[in-house]
Structures are given as structure tokens and as C-alpha cells.
Amino acid sequence: MNSDTPVISAEHVWKLFGPSPEAYLSRMPEDHSFEDIRSDGYIAGVKDVSLEVTKGEMLVIMGLSGSGKSTLVRCFSRLHDITGGVIRIDGQDIMSLNATELIELRRSKMGMVFQSFGLLPHRTVLENVAFPLEMRGQDRHARRERALEMVRLVGLEGREDYFPRELSGGQQQRVGIARSLAIEPNIWFLDEPFSALDPLIRREMQDEFLRLQDMLGKTIVFITHDFDEALRLADRIAIMKDGAVEQVDTPDKIVLDPATEYVARFTEEVDKASVVHASVLATEGVPVDGEPVPGDATILSLARRLVEDMSDTIPVSLPDGGTGAMDRKAALAVLFGEKE
Amino acid sequence: MSDSGRANAIKSEAEAVSISAIRTRTIVLTLLGAAILLTVLKPWIPSVLVRLPEGAILPWADWLDAGFSWLQNDIGLIHVTRTISGWLGFLTDAAANVLYGKSRWPRLEALPWSVVAACSAVLGYWLGGWRLALLAGGTLVWTALMGQWKWAMETMSVIVVAVPFGFGIGLLLGMCAWKSRRFEEALRPILLVLQTLPFYSYLLPAVIFFKVGPTAASVATIVYSMPPMILMTIVGLRKVPPDVVEAGRMAGCTRWQMLRSVYLPSARSEILVGLNQVIMLALAMVVLTAFIGMPGLGAKLLAMMNSFKLGRSFEIGVTIVLLAVTLDRLSKAWVVKQPEHFEKGIPWWQRHAFLLLGLATFILFYMLSQYLPILDEVGRRQSLSMGKEIDTLIKGFLGISWVKAITDFLRWFFNIWVLIPTELALLFLPTFAVILVMTGVGYLLGGWFPALIGFLFFCAVAQLGWWDRAMLTLHSTLTAVFLAMLIGMPLAIWAAQRERASRWMIFACDTAQTFPSFIYLLPAIMLFGITPITVILAILIYTMVPVVRYTVEGLRGVPREITEAADMAGATRWQKLWKVEFPLAMPTIAVGLNQAFIFAFFMVIIAAFIGTRDLGQEMQRTLAGTDLGKNFTLGFSVVFMALTLDIAINSWARKRREILGQ
């Protein structure tokens, strides 16, 4: 595998639920809608999804309940066998793996965090974290060492010998996170990890999660039904509806340029100025005078400059080292939430 | 859909419902009418419809005997069972040696009773604090002081062998059923039959295939106690949360690792509830193995009751009840006992405090009992048994003129005005009329499937050749359950109106349900001696427990908002009870009623030894010989009748639940 092979790639992935999904998929007309499929007695969990996740990227899959986001991530980890299409992990077709190879893949490359934590009630914090290591047969001493390290990483030291029921929801999910990281996975799946937590704890856990991601730089597929959470965390967002992906793009692009009516409905209430970054509004190659603003600054953080600077364009320093020009009017429109 | 279209659809649906109600009524009334007609025209209808003639009854017993003999000798099953028998015998003997000093391997001396009692108290303390310690220790102290230690240990020696097997085999079968749908589907009907099979049909095959004595007792006990273990295992494994399962799979578990480290530990509670059930049923059965000559508490109780020594019987009864409650509370405490963590830096002897305490207790009492023989064994003369005194007391009480007047009146009233007339009526009915009525009951409660079952099963009862005896059995159960409802329902309704009373009532019923069924005969015999009314009273007490329990539970379980809504609608107490609470509680009450019937069929057979004239009496006679075929035709007559009611009531409850969206 070379360095620009995507870590996860999905091509025309289908997952149908029903009596004999493969046979149905092969004879189904191509333009069948979700409703058409349902009236035939099948549920399209995942409907013709193609996307890629590159190394170190965080893809957030966003959708309402029943949109198929959880099903899609379970296809990536092959907790579900897909009905059609191909999923490759590091270039390898995972449907071609036999049971042993699949177990090996999960033991070495994947970690997953679950919405209701999925902790084993009869094991202590430490034993839960060490569980995947125990399963792959690591010796007691080594797995204890590693598990302790993970417990410390998520800030639960001193609680190693507690049982899950003795912990709060947030603490339980920290255990879930520590467990999923114990085997040092390259790929990290998080299925609505913070949805079961109350809003204050959720915020705290998101910060914690961003801290961990800065430190570890994993390839992440993160699922949420909370658009704000998606905007806050994502490198790219995939918005799903009825099993299909409506749009995959950076948060800026999704907010500025929603591809479908459905996506637009989500973005309506969002304060765009706090999402859109200066670099997105900048055009390269046009020379501009003045002190450039950083490209990764949000429009909101540049509010004063935008209002006070009277020039038509404002220079922006881009991530690749160049400088671009940002149209001040367009930026102000974003700031005041005006429609173009 | 347009509004008018929707309205039409609703209307046609409502019409469909009322049409089906009318159809049900027509069919049921037709069947009932036909039955009445048959009865009225009895002298003129063909005799085949009145009673199946001898010639029409196939020799089922002979065929079964031939089948068993083929299994036993031609296939050579007897060698297999005798080998198993040898192993089981070895285990029960070893347990008997440790518990009461039977001279078998490992040839230790019997454990002093004080050691067992003290260690049980420590176990009780560990599981549930000082109350359980007191219960466990106290029960065993009582047993020893009453001079019943050896009998109790004879009983326990079978239990300690049967329970692990019942648990293990049940767990294994449960796991298989959970893995394979087909296996489960094959298992379900067998479990249903086992649940309604009279205990004599457990005992006789056990004796024939596994020798008289502790081995046969263990086998019968294992088979009898297993079904709930299987069911609880299936329930527990199905209930493991999907997140936990997926977490296990993502951790890269192999199938074996999944089962061992994820599924089984996560299903711990249900599995332990299953174990609790195994223990309780094992105790109930072990007591009954007195009928195949297994020594122990059951045998003593049977002997004392037979010779009408009420005082001694009472003492043994108390011991059995105490043992049952102790075993139940200890195992239930284990279900809810959750692991606790220890803070860092706690030394090892504090982590294992209870284990060490147990060991110390063991050593201490062992040493003490070497110097104080009374702690080792309570001799005959030292025992505090007051059998004679209690005997005089009870008999004196029953001899008081007004008490005697009441019991005599009750005996006369029930015999002359209730039991004999209804019994004669049931015997008078033509066979085919009864079959039609049962078909109608099945249709009324559950539609065509229970109706078909009722028809086929009662035809089968007729065909098995014990119709009159079967009717007597049916008569006892129906009368007793009817009386149990007559007394139990008002009691339950009264209790359900009160928070504290319902809590106490449920607690009392749950405790009473742990008593081995045999015990329920005791109060009946005490009050009425050995008469037909005793049988009815024993069944009545036994079946009242589920009737009361489920009625209270059903009525209390009605959601608060609904009763509040009824209050706000201005319902009076009675309106609320009849229009709101009862309809919603009915499915739960039906479950209780169903259990009452199954209990009744079980008890009526036990009561055979008082001297009934029904199926049980014949079954008891088969125990003396090797008449397996006859035993099974009798046993299955009971099974068919019990299952008809079970299937009908259950399908009614299920349908009702669906309609109510529960």
C-alpha cells in the first residue's frame, strides 16, 4: 500500500435488510428510491454510498436516527456484512477476509466506541480496558501496563478497580474510549459516543476528545445526530438521509453551499460566521496590501477587522504558505448571516 | 388516503371485529348447545359418545411397555443408565459421607452440625448481612436441636449432587437452544410437557433405569429441576445488550471468547435466577422422592403423616419450610450481589475477610465439637423435639367442641353440597360432551388453535382409557381452583387497594411459593384428617398463592396515569376497579390462574396418598412394580388435560396483551 491509498474506501456500498437481500439487489432497478425498496419489503440501511477517508482525517457522519449512519459504520468494521459494493481498509477488500483474518484485523487496526458504552459489567475499569488485549492473548503484565497507561490518558487514574456501575455516564464513556484505544488502532470508530451524556458533560467530553485526537492523530469515523457537534469536530462531514449520503464536504462548504434541500435545512439555524474560515473565502494569486489574517481564523473572530478595514479585499495567509484575497463584502454577508 | 376513505377503513375494521365476536359467540354456543343436547339425550345416543367402549381403546400401555423394553434391553440403554447410575451413586455416597457419615469413600467422619451451621451463617453474612446469617444459622441450629439433622443431611446429600447437574445440563441445553432456533423449537414442547408431567412419571422411570434410592432420586430431581434453567439461560443470553456484543466483536473475540467472556458474564443475573429455580425445584422434588423410598426429611414427613403424628409432622414441616426459605434467600442474595472494588492499599487479609472468617469459623467449631459432643451431634434424648406435646395440643384444639363443630360442619357441607354433586355431574356427562365443552373453551379463549388442541387432547384422554379417573382428577382441580379464586380474589383486591398490604401480600406469596409442594398437605391433614375434603383444601391453599400474588401484582401494575385519569373522570372506587384496573390487570391475572391450574394438577396427584380415587391413585400403585406403560398413560392423561388449559389461557393472555399494547 502506498501513502496516498485511502485508509477507508467505500464504493457503491449497499446494505439491505430483508429476506434475501443479495438476490433482490441484483434484480432491483437502479433508480429505485428508499420508499420503492421499502414497499418491496426491504429496508435500505445503506444505499449506494461511496466515500473515502484519508489517513489522519476525521470524517463525521451526520444524520437523524434511522438515516443509516450507524449501519454504515458497522459495514466499515464488518459488524454487518454488506449486500453490494466494495469496502477497502488500507486497500484490502474486507468482505474477502475469512473469520480469522477479520478477527486479526479488528485486533490490530480497529477500535470502536459505542453510544451506550458497551462495558462489561462484571469487569473493573482496568479489566475492561485490558479486554481487547486479553482477547489477542497479550500476557497479563504487558496488558496491565498498557491498560494503566490508557486509564491515565482518559483521566481515570485512581478508579482502576471500580466497576462500571460505580461510575457516572461520562466516566463510563471514558472507559469505553480507553478500551477502544488500548490496542493502538489506526482506525477509530465512534458511534454517537456522547449522545447518552448530558449537555455539560458532552461539551467536556468533546474537548477531551479533541485533545486526544491532537495527540494521537488517528483516522476517525465519528457518528452523531448533532449538527453542532459535527461542525465542531469534523475535518469533513457526510450527511446521510434514508441510507444515502446527501453531501460529503468540509464544514465550511456544507454551511456555505449545501448540496440539497435537506442539507440546507440543517444549516439554516447555524451561525455560519463561527464555522466558515477565512481561507475558504480567499481567492489565491490576487496581490493585496496589508497585514494578512490567518487562514484558519473563523469569520466571527475577524469581525472587528472586517467592520473596521475599509478596503474591498483583505489578505489571507493560506495553509500552503501563499496569500489569498478575501472579498470583504462576501465575508460581511457571512458575518451578518445574509443570504446572497 | 382521504378522510372519508380513512373513516371507511376504520368502520370496516370495527365491523370485522364485531363480526369475529359474533362468530366466536355462535361457534361457542353451538358447541355448548351440542354438549347439553348430548347430555340430555344421554339414554338415547350411541354408547360410543357416552363412554369409549373397552374394545375401542388401543393397548397404549402395552405398546409403551414394548417401546421401553426395546429401549432398555435391545438398544441397551439400561447399560448406559446403569453406568451413569454408578457415577451418580458414587457422588451421592461421597456427599452422604461428608454430610452425615455414611460409610463410603472418602470415609471421613460426618461434619459436626455446628460447623455446618456456623459456616452457613458466615455465608449468609457475606451474601446478605446479619439477617441472612441469622436465617441460615438459625435454620440449621433448629434442625439439629429438633433431632432432625441426619434426615436433613440425607435430603441435602441428593440436593448437592443434583443441583450442579441440573444447573450444568440446563445451562448447556439453554445455550444450544439460544444458538439454534430449530433446537429451541424442538425443546419447547418437551419443556411444556415436563412442566405438567405428574411427579410419579418422573419417579418410576428413574427407578427402573437408575436403581432405587439416592441415584433414582437424583435423576428425577435433575430432570425435574432443569426446565427453568434452560429458559432463564435463553432469556439471559438474548438480553445481552447489542452494544456489549459489538464491543466484544470489535475487540476481536473468537466465538469461544465471545461466549465465555462476553455473553455468559453479561447474562449472570438471569443464569443465577435459573440456579435459584433449580435449587427450589430440587428441594421440592427431593422431598417427594420419599415415595420411591429415598430416606430424608420427606420420608420422615410421609411416615409421620401416615401414622397421624401431627406434632412430629409439624416440626418436620417447619424444618422443610425453613430450609426452603434459607436456600431461596441465599441464592437470591447471590443474584443481586454485585462485585465491589477495594480501595488501594487494603491488605490481602481484608480483601478476603469473609473467606478467612469462614475458615476460622470452620476450625473453631470443629475443635469445639471435639470437646463438646453436643456440638458434634445432638442425640435422641437431647433433642428438643416436642412432638408429643404439640400433638396433644393440636388434637386438643381440634377436639374443642366449637372447633369440632365448625370442621364437622365444613366437612359435611362441602361433601354433601359441593364435592359429591359436582363430581357426580361430571361423571354423568357423556365423554363426547366434555370434549365439545373443552373445544368450546379453547375457541372462546384463544381461537381455533387452542380449540383444536382441546379437542385432540381430550380425545386422547378418552383414548388412553382412564376417562372416569381423569374426570375425578379434573373435578378436584377445577373445584379447588374455583374455590381458591372465590377466596383469593377478594383478598387480593382488598390488598391491592393498600400499599403496605400489597407489599406484604406479595412477600408472603413469594415466600410461600418457595415451600415444597408436599408441605401444603400438612395444614389440610391437620384440620380435616384423611378425607376427600383434605385433598381439595391442600390444592386450594397451594393454588391460592399464585391467584393472590398475580392478582395483586396485576392490579398494582396498572400505570399511575391511567388510574389518575380514571379518578379525574370522576370514577368511583368500584367503577375504577371494574372498568379500569381489572381489564388492564387481566393478562397478569390469567398468568396466575394458569399457574394455579398447573399447581393444582401437580398437587392432586401428590394427594393420592391421602386416598383419592383418581389418576394419582393408579399412578401411585404403579410405583410398586415396573409398569412404565401404565404409568405413562396415566401421566399423559394429566399432561393432556393440563396442557389444554395452559395453551388456552396463555393464548388468551397473549391476545389480550397485544390488544392492550402491553
Image (cartoon, coloured by chain):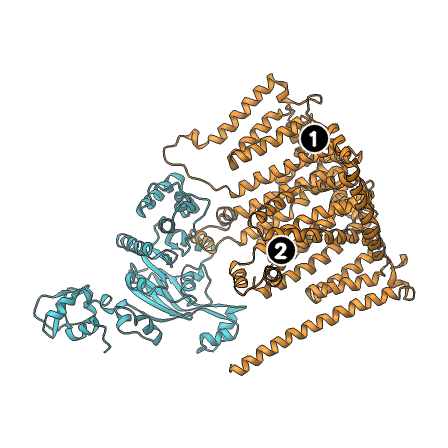
**The hue in which chain B appears in the rendered picture of the protein:** orange
What's under tag 2, amino acid-wise? Glu
Helix, strand or loop at disc 2?
Answer: helix
**Could you say which is closer to the camera, residue B179 or residue B206?**
B206
| Residue type highlighted by circle 1 | Trp
The chain letter under disc 1 is B
- Are dots 2 and 1 on a single chain? yes
Furthest toward the top, the residue is: B371
> Is residue A311 something that shows in the picture?
yes
Q: Which quadrant is home to the C terminus of chain B?
A: bottom right
Residue picked out by circle 2: B184
Q: Could one spot residue B82 in this view of the protein?
A: no
Tell us which disc is closer to us: 2 or 1: 1
Where does the image place residue B601, in percent across and percent down from the top left? Answer: 74, 50
Tell me which residue sits at (47%, 57%) in the image: A98
Numbered badge on residue B151: 1
Nearer to me, B395 or B12: B395
The answer to which quarter of the image holds residue A244 is bottom left
